[in-house]
Image (cartoon, helix red, strand yellow):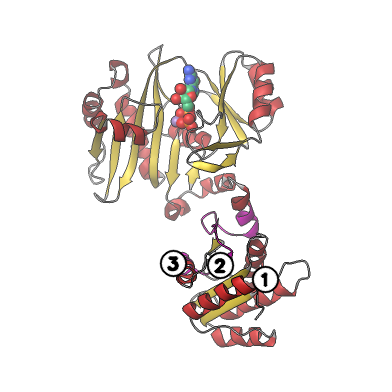
Amino acid sequence: MKLMEWQGKELFRRAGIPTPRGEVVRDPEDAAAFVAANPGSWVLKSQVLMGGRGKAGGIKFADDPNQARALAGELIGKVLKNEQNPDGERVGALLIEEKVAIESEAYVSIAIDRAAKKPIVMLTAQGGMDVEEVAARDPGAIAKYWIDPAIGFSPFIARRLAFAANFPAGFHKALPGVIGGLYRVFMDYGANLVEINPLVLTKDGAVIASDAKVELDDNGLFRHPELQAWKTEGPVDDDQAAAIATGLGLSNYAKLDGDIGVIANGAGLGMGTMDAIRNAGGAAANFLDIGGGAQAELVKKSYNLVVSDPRVKAMFINIFGGITRGDQVAKGIVEALAGDDVRKVPLVVRLTGTNEKEGRAILAAAKMNPVETMDEGARRVVEMARGGVFP
Ligand code: GDP
Ligand code: MN
């Protein structure tokens, strides 16, 4: 789960990392009211998961309530785009934060280094820009340290890193606290990544996390049920919102370039199905994983989601039943096709595994004949997409 900036900063504050004071608003009037109640200079920051908001026009400055209202009105609802995110991301909320006078911008992060099987701390004094850019242009400017989780992170390491990365002197005293706090967030919340870019040294000599990027490992989320509420913050574009409305997770549905709809159970089978379609000379219009143990209702809704894409000319439903029961899947398919309100496309079904017989019987009663193998199914669905032949 990727966190919005304001959520990441909430975790930072819990770990004692200084952040600017601020407030989350979802309405231009609230932005105006906040600035009216707190006179001063404020930054309006679009809350989206994509990076590079500054360059994409998602960060504005306001000095009075009217300006705050006007800029918030511009930003809320706007779709921010940049090279990495050509589809863009709609702004739902703004974080209004005290504008600080920047003396210097640095970069600090902790991530999992999968090769070393350890958390890696990275620092560079060249903050505020893409760290990949720094890595490409000036790799020596990045100081690295691999943390042994059995030992933890010691303040003296932070001091050593501050020197290694040539941090301006103003950073040095605060750095052990910042990295120590970052490591606590990393471990306590089971993160894959915690990043502060920029870590700001202000003209007044304070060191503040001006931005926050936090990615949590979904497998560890059960340890923090209080963070469940943040999951609803997830959908970042129309497709993801549609996936959530369908009852799927954000990583269970993705649109692709082809014209053959795909529904499978399990991400691996979904990808295998896309490959089989590719090998048969076709191209998948989407990836959709109904997950384990899906009930008829989810199958039906997933069918509707896939055919709601007008490019889809034919569909391949590929189920290998383990915890997913074939009869539930078959029931969902039959129910989906029973509705008059749903677009019907030529459909190929492969159904093996748990309750396969029962599932096939349900399909047979509806005059559908499932195929035996994935490759056979892929060949047939590609033919159907080309010719539009109904089975
Ligand atoms: P990102 O572009 O999505 O990474 O968003 P950031 O939160 O990193 O902000 C981008 C840039 O906006 C920063 O690098 C700063 O240059 C600028 N910025 C953000 N907050 C402030 C602030 O309080 N004061 C000043 N002067 N600039 C800021
Ligand atoms: Mn940033």
Residue range (magenta): 242-271
Q: Residue at x 58, y 83 (%)?
A: 370
Tell me residue 201's x, y (percent): 38, 18
Specify the label residue 268 is tagged with: 3
Question: Disc 3 and disc 1: Cα gap in Å?
Answer: 24 Å
- Residue sitting nearer the eye, 236 or 25: 236
**In front here: 115 or 175?**
115
N-terminal of the pair, mark 2 or mark 1, is 2
Q: Quick one: SS at disc 1? A: loop
Q: Who's the residue at 41% across and 26% down the image?
A: 128
Tell which tag, 2 or 1, sits nearer the viewer.
1
Q: Is residue 178 left or right of residue 379?
A: left
Q: Are circles 3 and 1 on residues that touch, CB within 8 Å?
A: no
Tag 3: residue type? Gly
Note whether residue 19 is visible: no
Q: In the image, what residue type sits under mark 1?
A: Val
- The residue indicated by pointer 1 is 345
Numbered label attached to residue 262: 2
- Where disc 3 sits, the SS reads helix
User: Image quadrant of residue 366?
Assistant: bottom right
Decide if residue 201 is on the left or right side of residue 138: right
Q: Earlier in the sequence, mark 3 or mark 2?
A: 2
Q: Are marks 2 and 1 in contact (CB under 8 Å)?
A: no
Inspect the magenta stretch and tell me whether residue 249 lies in it.
Answer: yes
